[in-house]
């Protein structure tokens, strides 16, 4: 398939969509600061940590909507012909490709965070309010900084390859900055499942576009 002659590289609608993603994360950082001010007690702060982690993961721009190659070469049995990503790494619709593995690792991390929620509900322990609160405050500042920088760099991107590299770096930085594994350890839970799930998710993200 040959891309539409009127399309641009990188596609402007993908740049606009990623700009909206950046705005969304800036909003999440602001909401986290506000919610942190209102949270009372260690359990409320831990619940906020879990909810914040899930919201951050839910908004990662992994959908084809945010892929310049899927915009130029629509995914499918025939339409992927000519796609630079498919030629290099395999069609993202196929099982076992780097994109497919990244998605699966992402889902596993989400499920592991949800498992922490269930563990908290079964626990009768008290939780370290100040330490968890500090970790979340740092997260809010980090996310706001990453989102602002990502938005500026997306505006200046000059190719689909550069846009993919920026997007991959942004997602990896976001996942890497999530303090949920540290929070889990502070609360006395076994943080090894979270550490492993986070490591796998980061590995999957970086491998799905190794040029990042």
Image (cartoon, helix red, strand yellow):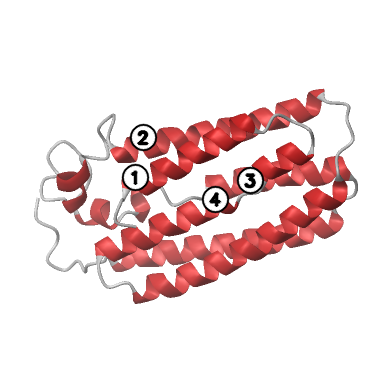
Which numbered disc, 4 or 2, marks the residue closer to the eye? 4
**First-in-chain label (2 vs 3):** 3
The quarter of the picture where residue 17 lies is bottom left
How far, Cα to Cα, is label 4 from label 2? 18 Å
**Marks 3 and 1: in contact by CB < 8 Å?**
no
Give the mark nearest the N terminus, 4 or 3: 3
Residue 178 can be seen in this image: yes
Q: Residues within 10 Å of mark 3 (few under 14, many from 20)?
A: many
List x then y, in percent, for residue 198.
Answer: 54, 40
Q: Please give the name of the residue rendered at 29% of the width and 30% of the height, measured from the top-left corner.
A: 96
Q: Quadrant of residue 159?
A: bottom left
Residue under pointer 2: 101
Other-residue count near label 2 (Cα within 10 Å), few / some / many at <14 / 14–19 / ≥20: many
Q: Real-space Cα distance between discs 4 and 3?
A: 11 Å
For image coordinates 21% across by 49% down, the residue present is 85
Residue 63 in view of the camera = no
Q: Position of residue 60 (x, y in %)?
A: 48, 50
Q: Residue at x 48, y 64 (%)?
A: 20
Mark 2 and mark 1: Cα distance apart in space: 9 Å
Circle 4: element type? helix
SS class, disc 1? helix
Q: Are marks 2 and 1 in contact (CB under 8 Å)?
A: yes
Residue under label 1, please give it.
207
Q: Give the residue pinned by disc 3.
A: 53
Instruction: Count neighbours of disc 1 (C-alpha within 10 A) and say few if under 14, some if 14 to 19, many if 20 or more.
Output: some
> Which residue is disc 4 drawn over?
176
Q: CA distance from mark 1 to mark 3?
A: 22 Å
Between tags 4 and 3, which lies in front?
4
Q: Nearer the viewer, mark 2 or mark 1?
A: 1
Q: Tag 3 or tag 1, which sits nearer the N-term?
A: 3
């Amino acid at each position: 398939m040959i891309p539409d002659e009127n399309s641009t590289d990188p596609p402007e609608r993908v740049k606009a969509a990623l700009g909206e993603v950046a705005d969304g994360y800036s909003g999440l950082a602001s909401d986290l600061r506000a919610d942190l001010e209102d949270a009372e007690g260690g359990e409320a702060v831990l619940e906020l940590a879990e909810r914040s982690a899930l919201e951050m993961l839910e908004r990662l721009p992994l959908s084809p909507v945010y892929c310049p190659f899927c915009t130029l070469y629509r995914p499918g049995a025939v339409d992927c012909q000519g796609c630079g990503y498919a030629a290099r790494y395999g069609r993202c619709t196929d099982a076992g490709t780097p994109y497919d593995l990244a998605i699966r690792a992402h889902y596993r991390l989400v499920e592991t965070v949800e498992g922490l929620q269930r563990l908290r509900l079964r626990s009768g322990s008290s939780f370290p309010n100040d330490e968890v609160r500090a970790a979340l405050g740092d997260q809010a500042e980090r996310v706001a900084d990453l989102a602002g920088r990502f938005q500026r760099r997306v505006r200046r991107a000059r190719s689909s390859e550069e846009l993919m590299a920026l997007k991959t770096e942004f997602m990896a930085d976001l996942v890497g900055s999530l303090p949920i594994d540290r929070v889990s350890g502070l609360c006395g839970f076994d943080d090894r499942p979270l550490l492993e799930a986070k490591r796998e998710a980061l590995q999957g993200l970086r491998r799905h576009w190794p040029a990042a």
